[in-house]
Image: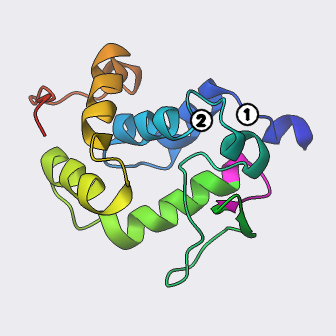
Amino acid sequence: MAEHNEFSADKLIGMINKMNFRYPYIVYAQAILETSNFQSRIFKENHNIFGMKQAVIRITKSLGTQYEHAYYKNWMESLDDYALYSSTYLSPLNTESEYFNYLGQNYAEDSQYVSKLKQIIVTMNLKSKFNYKDSENISMNN
């Protein structure tokens, strides 16, 4: 079981694909940004992939708070919690632009959050990593 729970970027990509997020490349970019490329203390000690705070209104998989962020049994529980967050707040959004706007206004404290996500997506060519095909190219403007 421990091997199953062991983190790898490839396992995360596979799980994001299985969970059928509308914009999987944005979700993965968030994981990279929020964890400083999977090196942050919040990720390593809290198993928190998305910098999530403890949820108080919605259902959560979090076990509590440590270092002012939610902590989880393992990284998959963090991904499940993000899916719960997504289904609660992000599911009504219909376009990539609406998604980015929501994240910029409601998710992150960093005013450059969306720009940083877009840069990661373009630099790492994440749309192709998720076999995501659409006619939109990411606008680097907020």
Range covered by the magenta-colored residues: 70-76
Q: Nearer the viewer, residue 27 or 115?
A: 115
Q: Report the disc number at residue 128.
A: none
What's the residue type where badge 1 is placed?
A: Phe
x, y (%) of residue 9? Answer: 61, 26
Dots 2 and 1: beta carbons under 8 Å? yes
Q: Please tell me how crowded label 1 is: few (under 14), some (14-19), or many (20+) other residues with Cα within 10 Å.
A: some
Residue at left offset 27%, top offset 19%:
122
123 in relation to 32, above or below? above
Query: Looking at the figure, which quarter contains the C terminus?
Result: top left
Instruction: Give the image location of residue 67, x and y in percent.
Output: 70, 58
Residue positioned most to the right? 1
Q: Position of residue 105 (x, y in %)?
A: 24, 60
Q: At which x and y percent is residue 87? A: 40, 67
Amino acid at pointer 2: Leu
**Helix, strand, or loop for circle 1?**
loop
Residue drawn at x 35%, y 39% is 26
When the figure is inspected, residue 88 is found, relative to residue 56, above or below; the finding is above
* Vertical position of residue 67 compared to residue 18: above or below: below
Residue 12 got which mark? 2
**Which numbered disc covers residue 7?**
1
Q: Is residue 62 magenta?
A: no
Q: Is residue 37 left or right of residue 133?
A: right
